[in-house]
Image: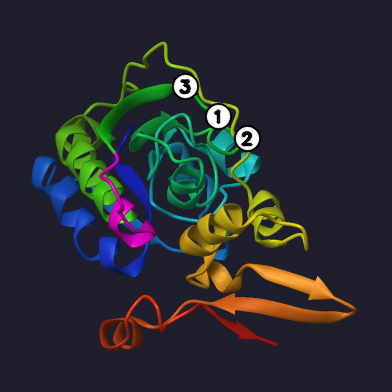
């Protein structure tokens, strides 16, 4: 019998989302987890009675866990189907995409490859930052969660899926590092584009040039520095 939701999310979401689900089903047990180790510690009997909901998490759920869940697993991905995988906002801005969004899908062993349940799309505002685009995607994802919370908390049947395909864009940590590996003959506008999108030291990875065994990393000015300097006298600095 369906009576449990395993909620895989970050600390902030784990303080809010359980009450949303229990508001629709007071008898529902919501098990908060934040790591792969916590997932692995869940016993088989609990998983048989449970469905898993993952919300904006970097944790990859093993296929062995997915196979034991009695009522499915569903992921709230902070990007549109065109951008499956890791850091979708950065890849979309690098591609100069005009549309972005958020996606809810069935979880399968391959990351961001399961049938799509729902999505929200919106135009990418001009000159938006990575954090700004992530914020818009998060807001749309939260709306999707609120709209689906009742059925996820009360209906043991899985949500209906839509005939929407995932894109083929390679959004991976390896692809991210490859873009941040700057060739010596790079054009000026391409260098500026990579620094603008990837120069915030997200995930500890930044645009880097290797020259004669020495590594040069681009470092964007901090917000405080940017506010006190003009564009002409505040160039991107280089850390060695």
Circle 1: element type:
loop
Label 2, label 3: how far apart the Cα atoms are: 11 Å
Circle 3: element type:
loop
Q: Position of residue 132 (x, y in %)?
A: 28, 57
Q: Position of residue 28 (x, y in %)?
A: 22, 46
Determine if the magenta segment contains residue 47: no
Read off the residue under disc 1. Answer: 113
Look at the numbered discs 2 and 1 and tell me whether their residues touch, using CB distance below 8 Å. Answer: yes
For this view, does 35 lie left or right of residue 105?
A: right
Read off the residue under disc 2. Answer: 110
Q: Residue at x 90, y 78 (%)?
A: 212
Circle 2: element type:
loop
For this view, does 4 lie left or right of residue 179?
A: left
Label 3, label 1: how far apart the Cα atoms are: 7 Å
Considering every residue shown, the one lying at the far right of the view is: 212
Look at the numbered discs 3 and 1 and tell me whether their residues touch, using CB distance below 8 Å. Answer: no
Tell me the magenta residue range. 124-133
Q: Quadrant of the C terminus?
A: bottom right
Look at the numbered discs 2 and 3 and tell me whether their residues touch, using CB distance below 8 Å. Answer: no
User: Which sits earlier in the primary sequence, circle 2 or circle 3?
Assistant: 2
Q: Residue at x 19, y 60 (%)?
A: 16
Q: Quadrant of the N terminus?
A: top left
Residue 115: numbered disc: 3
Residue 71 showing in the rendered view: no
Q: Residue at x 14, y 50 (%)?
A: 20
Q: Position of residue 85 (x, y in %)?
A: 54, 43
Name the chief secondary structure element in magenta. loop
Q: Position of residue 45 (x, y in %)?
A: 49, 44
Q: Is residue 216 above or below residue 97?
A: below
For this view, does 70 lie left or right of residue 22?
A: right
Of 104 and 122, the residue lying toward us: 122
The residue carrying pointer 2 sits among few (fewer than 14), some (14 to 19) or many (20 or more) residues within 10 Å by Cα, namely few
């Amino acid at each position: 019998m369906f009576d449990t939701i395993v909620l895989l999310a970050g600390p902030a979401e784990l303080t809010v989302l359980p009450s949303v689900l229990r508001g629709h089903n007071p008898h529902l047990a919501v098990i908060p987890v934040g790591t792969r180790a916590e997932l692995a510690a869940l016993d088989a009997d609990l998983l048989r009675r449970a469905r898993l909901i993952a919300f904006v998490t970097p944790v990859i759920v093993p296929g062995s866990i997915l196979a034991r869940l009695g009522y499915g697993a569903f992921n709230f991905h902070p990007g549109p189907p065109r951008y499956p995988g890791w850091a979708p906002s950065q890849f979309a801005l690098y591609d100069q995409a005009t549309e972005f969004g958020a996606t809810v899908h069935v979880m399968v062993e391959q990351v961001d490859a399961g049938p799509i349940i729902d999505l929200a799309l919106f135009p990418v505002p001009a000159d938006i930052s990575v954090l700004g685009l992530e914020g818009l995607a998060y807001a749309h994802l939260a709306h999707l969660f609120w709209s689906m919370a009742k059925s996820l908390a009360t209906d043991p049947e899985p949500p209906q899926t839509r005939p929407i395909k995932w894109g083929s864009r390679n959004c991976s940590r390896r692809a991210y590092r490859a873009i941040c590996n700057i060739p010596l003959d790079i054009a000026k506008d391409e260098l500026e584009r990579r620094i603008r999108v990837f120069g915030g030291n997200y995930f500890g990875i930044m645009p880097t040039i290797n020259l004669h065994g020495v590594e040069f990393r681009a470092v964007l000015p901090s917000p405080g520095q940017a506010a006190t300097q003009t564009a002409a006298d505040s160039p991107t600095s280089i850390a060695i």
